[in-house]
Image (cartoon, rainbow, N blue to C red):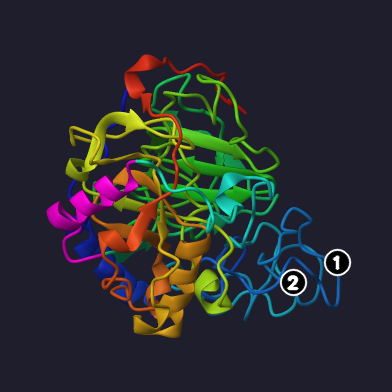
Amino acid sequence: MARLAPLGRVARLVFVTAIAAGCSAGSSTGTGGAGGVTATGGVTATGGVTATGGAAGNADLSATGGAKATGGAGGAKASGGVGGAASGGRTGTGGGASGGAAGSSAMAGPYRFPASSTIYQDISGAAVDAESTAIMSALDTSGWGTGLGIDVSFTVLTADASVARRAFTSSGDEPDCDTAPIPLPSGGNIEGNPDYHCADGGDCHLLVYQGTRLYELYQADASNGSAAGGTFSGSCEVVWDLTHDYWQPMAPPTFGRGDHCNGADAADLPMAALILTSGDVTSGQITHALRFTMPNGLIQQSVYVHPATHIGGPSGVGPTFLPYGARLRLRGDYDLSTLPSAEARTVARALQKYGMFLADGGSLYVSATVDVENVIATSSLRALKATDFEMVDGGSRYTWSDYKCQRTPVTN
């Protein structure tokens, strides 16, 4: 069954902006304790899992950018104790003074799929799609609107190995969707909401890294907003194995998680791996492709290109509309000096080297974490016109209705 990408993102962003304005200033406060969400900027915690005066909190958080333990065994600790600060997430003012409590959590660092994965490949010299000029010219005249914005709706969480996985009631389809229990770090939140309760009626994506897995759940909802208690439900779950490159050449219908298979987003691409983070921006060098959304009326009906394997609810008829999965690249001759800030130029360089994938319906936005607005103006990319981009050769067009999802769901 095809999931129609929800509309009304612009209205929802009014709500999200209000949350971000309060949460990024630390208005949502916890007092620390085990399992608090910890970060120096919403999605990126500084340093890997290390211990300078004791045993490392958790070996699973070994990726660069995980939580840092500054003394003592047990859990991860950052800036002031378990529960530390996370723009747009939770702010802890206490916690353990030395050595985090077991079960503590931090916002996600740069957990990565294998280096061979398409999202990390330099496509600055890749061939341009034969339909690129026609598509981008049509977009320039019919729908690019006020330009490319930055959607600061998302939170990406990390759960250490001691955070128990919680079963949920699924309303998604099998075999498209997985049903494995999902770790819920204490103090975390879902897209567009201050906690785990889906109060805004939006996409309510839950994005959690744990060990070598990435859990992504569409329309997640814990009825009481907490990691424990109440009821926990969701629509389509995807469990991504970070040790696996899903996007090596394969014959349909076996590409990705399976051609025609639904996912946590409409294109069935890994969301957290493509979302822009504050750490990306402040590093000065982004090393992965980004994801973007645009109105369904500007997306080609019933068609996708790999690495997408699914569609939402597109309604554009004809080859002058972008297909789901399209990878846009900012033209190499674009004058970056015209952009308003060094941070905007950092994002633009990533768009020249790695590009951005059309992943879902919505307004014209690059997807980003809630704290990104603290390091770059969300209007920084507005000057970029459709004709400043090219569509990288997408290869074969696939008609969504030609395949039936064939895969074995992850149940544990």
The answer to whether residue 193 is left or right of residue 128 is: left
Mark 2 residue crowding within 10 angstroms, few (<14) / some (14–19) / many (20+): many
Please provide percent x and percent y for residue 355.
46, 57
Hey, what amino acid is under mark 2?
A: Ala
Asked if the residues shown at circle 1 and circle 2 are in contact, with their CB atoms under 8 angstroms apart, the answer is yes
Secondary element at image label 2: loop
Residue 9 is labelled as none
Q: Which residues are magenta?
A: 131-147
Give the image location of residue 235, x and y in percent: 37, 33
**Which residue: 69% across, 46% down?**
114
Q: Is residue 240 above or below residue 132?
A: above
The reply to whether the magenta stretch includes residue 152 is no
For this orientation, the residue located farthest to the right is 54
Residue at the image position 29 percent from the left and 68 percent from the top:
384
Q: Is residue 156 in view?
A: yes
Q: Is residue 223 visible?
A: no
* Identity, as a three-letter code, of the amino acid under mark 1: Ala
- Asked which quadrant contains residue 322, the reply is top left
Q: CA distance from mark 1 to mark 2?
A: 8 Å
Q: Which residue is mark 1?
A: 55
The residue depicted at 54 percent of the width and 50 percent of the height is 208
Residue ID for mark 2 = 69
The reply, left or right, for residue 333 in relation to residue 7 is right
Question: Residue 158 versus residue 349: which sits nearer the camera?
Answer: 349
Is residue 135 inside the magenta stretch?
yes
